[in-house]
Amino acid sequence: MTSDDDAAAAEGSLHGRLRGLISALGGMVGDRVLLLSLELRLAGRALGTIVALGVGAAVAALTAWLGLWLALGAWIVDSGGSHAVAALVVIVANGVLAALCLVKARGLLKLLTLPATLRTLTGAAHERDVDAAPPLAARPEAPVP
């Protein structure tokens, strides 16, 4: 064999190897896309089940909550209080609890604006970001897994 024949054989072999590599990569990508679609389908079913279970839990919790306040009202009436006083206690207690929940929710609203992401992407401080976390350089280093 001449050196030209050796070069042609090496080139043909390299071309064949590249074609095989590309074919294998396509198969691996296809397998991963199939796995992703199957997992997304499974995740969708799981999410539906989770939502249904959450609705059931909310109904049970609401029933227990109403029973708790009914028992408290009955205790007030049995202890000599009037129905009006019992109703007022239940209404005021629930109103205070609702107000506390709303105050806490309002405090969390600023997090929905993604302040750190906006600050990073725009390179400037976000106007609504009053409780900014310390910069990454000021945080203690976390061990890298």
Image: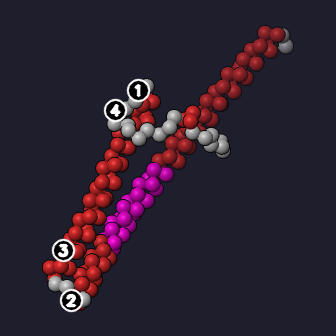
Task: State the CA–CA distance, disc 3 to disc 1.
Answer: 50 Å
Q: Is residue 74 visible?
A: no
Compared across the picture, whether 98 is left or right of 131 comes to left
Residue underneath mark 3: 88
The answer to which of marks 2 and 4 sits earlier in the sequence is: 2
Q: Nearer the viewer, residue 87 or 55?
A: 87
The answer to which of marks 3 and 1 sits earlier in the sequence is: 3
Kind of residue at badge 3: Leu
Task: State the CA–CA distance, disc 2 to disc 4.
Answer: 55 Å
The residue under the point 85% across, 13% down is 1
The residue under the point 37% across, 65% down is 54
Q: Nearer the viewer, residue 15 or 61?
A: 61
Task: State the CA–CA distance, disc 4 to disc 3.
Answer: 42 Å
Compared across the picture, whether 99 is left or right of 112 comes to left
Image position of 111 with respect to 98: above or below: above
Percent of width and height locating residue 81: 19, 85
Q: Around disc 1, counting alpha carbons within 10 Å, would you say few (fewer than 14), some (14 to 19), or many (20 or more)?
A: few
Residue underneath mark 4: 127
Compared across the picture, whether 16 is left or right of 76 comes to right
The answer to which of marks 2 and 1 sits earlier in the sequence is: 2
Residue 121 in the magenta stretch? The answer is: no
The answer to which of marks 2 and 3 sits earlier in the sequence is: 2
Task: State the CA–CA distance, disc 2 to disc 3.
Answer: 15 Å
Q: Which residues are magenta?
A: 39-61
The residue under the point 30% across, 74% down is 65
Q: What is the secondary structure assignment of the residue under circle 1?
A: loop
Quarter-of-image position of residue 111: top left
Residue underneath mark 2: 80
